[in-house]
Image (spheres, rainbow, N blue to C red):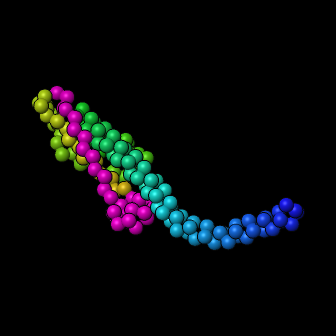
Amino acid sequence: MGKGAGVARSHRITRWLRRDRGATAAEAALVLPVILMVLFGIIDFGRLVNAQIVVSQAAREGGRAEAVGASASTRASDAAQGLGPVATVVLESCGDEPDPEDHAHVVVSHDFEFVTPVVALAGLASDSITLDAHGVMPCRG
């Protein structure tokens, strides 16, 4: 095999690689939006789960505060400080002299807004959803 055969072979390989370049760009154009939607969906889902955990913790803190006679809304807002505004509703209060069977029941709500438009594009929900959590604690009597 002479020197000319090796050069001809390398020219065939480079021609084949150049011909395949357009197919690679087309495949990337088809796959990239799917990969980005999955990535953004993972990001928003992680934020949603974190927000639900914070809202649940705020409801527990609000229920605990209501059970000992403190302000449930202040305690719940403090617990959800990094999340933003939360709405606190006291459904059952312990009162001045609670029975041992009485419970404090607090509901905390938060309007969660998605950062990426993936959920709206998929038609699963609108740009925001409301997260609710209930905190129930026995009253200290």
The residue nearer to you, when weighing 50 against 39, is 39
Question: In this rendering, would 135 be left or right of 16?
Answer: left
Identify the residue at image location x=75%, y=68%.
12
- Inspect this view and state whether residue 58 appears: no
Rendered position, 60 above or below 112: above
What residue appears at the point 70 percent right and 67 percent down from the top-left corner? 17
Range of the magenta residues?
A: 113-141
Q: Does the magenta segment cover residue 131?
A: yes
Residue at x 43%, y 64% (from the top left corner): 117
Which quadrant would the N terminus be assigned to in this image?
A: bottom right
Location of residue 37 in the rendering, given as x and y in whole percent from the top left corner: 46, 61
Q: Say whether residue 43 is left or right of residue 25.
A: left
The residue that appears at 28% across and 50% down in the rendered structure is 132
Task: State whether residue 116 appears in this view.
Answer: yes
Residue 24 sits in quarter: bottom right
Location of residue 61 in the rendering, given as x and y in whole percent from the top left corner: 31, 38
Residue 86 in the image: state x and y as whole percent: 33, 51
Extreme residue in the right direction? 3
Instruction: Looking at the picture, tell me which residue is in the foreground, 14 or 24.
Output: 14
Tell me how many marks there are: 0
Quadrant of image for the C terminus = top left
Q: Is-magenta flag for residue 15? A: no
Specify the quadrant of the image occupied by residue 44: bottom left
